[in-house]
Image: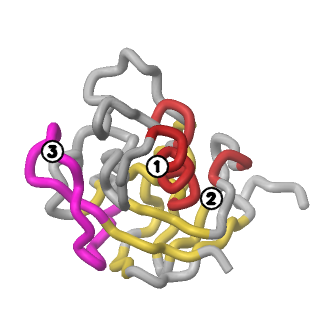
Amino acid sequence: MAHLVAVNRSDCRTDPKVDIGGGELRAGYGLVSDSHAGLGEREVSLVALESIEAANRQYGIEAGPGSFADNLTTQGIDLLTLKLGDRLRVGVTLLEVVQIGKTLDASHTYNFHGVSILPKYGIFCNILEGGYVNKGDVIEVVKSESSNS
């Protein structure tokens, strides 16, 4: 079952994020108290723990949740199969995928010891329904209202 393994925030946009265990996702804003909140439609970033672990093996680093500036670290869901407009129910919240990956030359493409996985393995969502999320919350892909099936 897909679930949330960490909720991560930072005080400064250039700092790695740290796991705070839970937090409020506010629609139209982002993760309350995070340095990236309120900066646009890419309200929260998600990275799979599996991608972090693969980077650790490939590059010989010891990254963890938040090391790549991810707000939400997931496990058990293949984020790379999602498409723009797909929706995720994370605990009580509802997110919508608005960007997949990030260009390498984009400002604030955070790296950990010279490694950046957001361009290839990160996704960005806006928050349609806010609320509190916590480590362990279930993650489900839900059909949008415009879906025909």
**Numbered disc 3: secondary structure:** loop
Number of numbered callouts drawn: 3
**If the image is split into quadrants, where does the C terminus sit?**
bottom right
Residue at 28 percent across and 53 percent down: it is: 29
Residue 25 relative to residue 126: left or right = left
| Relative image position of residue 81 (x, y in whole percent) | 73, 48
User: Disc 3 marks which amino acid?
Assistant: Asp
Q: Is residue 5 above or below residue 104?
A: below
Q: In which quarter of the image is residue 26?
A: bottom left
Q: Residue furthest left?
A: 11
Q: How crowded is mark 1: few (under 14 residues within 10 Å), some or many (20 or more)?
A: some
Please identify, in this view, whether the residue under mark 1 or under mark 3 is nearer the observer.
1
Residue ID at (16%, 54%): 10
Q: What stretch is highlighted in magenta?
A: 8-27
- N-term mark: 1 or 3: 3
Residue that mark 1 sits on:
56
Q: In this view, does 136 lie above or below 31?
A: below
Disc 2 from disc 1: Cα separation: 29 Å
Relative horizontal placement of residue 50, taking residue 64 as reference (left or right) = right
- Look at the numbered discs 2 and 3 and tell me whether their residues touch, using CB distance below 8 Å: no
Task: Measure how far apart labels 2 and 3 are at the Cα level.
Answer: 28 Å
The residue singled out by tag 2 in the image is 87
